[in-house]
Image: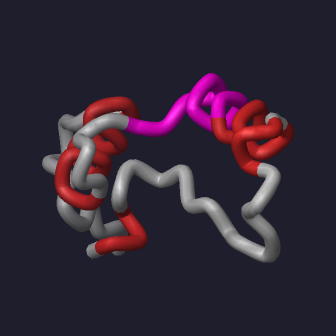
Amino acid sequence: MISTGLAPAEATPEQVFAGMVDQMVPLKRPQTPTDMAEVVAFRLSDKAANITGQTIAVDGGTVMT
């Protein structure tokens, strides 16, 4: 037996992923490599000089839920 879970049987993998993002991510969009790169650039800048020992979640707000 194969269960389709939350997705209708005729849904494409892209549709399933979009539906999961819409349900689970408060910002309603997947995060991109650019999102990650911008956080890395900030962390390497002088503006973040006083931040130590922190984990910065780049997840569209998923950690908050």
In screen coordinates, is 28 left or right of 63?
left
x, y percentage for residue 12?
A: 31, 32
Q: Is residue 14 above or below residue 4?
A: above
In screen coordinates, is 40 left or right of 56?
right
The quadrant in which the C terminus is found is bottom left
Residue drawn at (23%, 53%), measured in percent from left and top? 26
Nearer the observer, 64 or 24? 64
Residue drawn at (24%, 66%), measured in percent from left and top? 5
Queried whether the magenta region covers residue 34, the answer comes back as yes
Instruction: Indicate the quadrant where residue 14 lies.
Output: top left
Nearer the observer, 7 or 1? 7
User: Farthest residue toward the top?
Assistant: 34
User: Farthest residue toward the left?
Assistant: 8
Number of numbered discs: 0
x, y percentage for residue 34?
A: 62, 23
Chief SS of the magenta region: helix
Residue drawn at (71%, 37%), measured in percent from left and top? 42
Instruction: Indicate the quadrant where residue 63 lies.
Output: bottom left
The quadrant in which the N terminus is found is bottom left
Q: Is residue 29 above or below residue 43?
A: above
Queried whether the magenta region covers residue 13, the answer comes back as no
Range of magenta residues: 30-38
Instruction: Indicate the quadrant where residue 54 lies.
Output: bottom right
Nearer the observer, 24 or 61? 61
The colour scheme is: secondary structure
x, y percentage for residue 22?
A: 20, 46
Residue drawn at (81%, 38%), measured in percent from left and top? 46
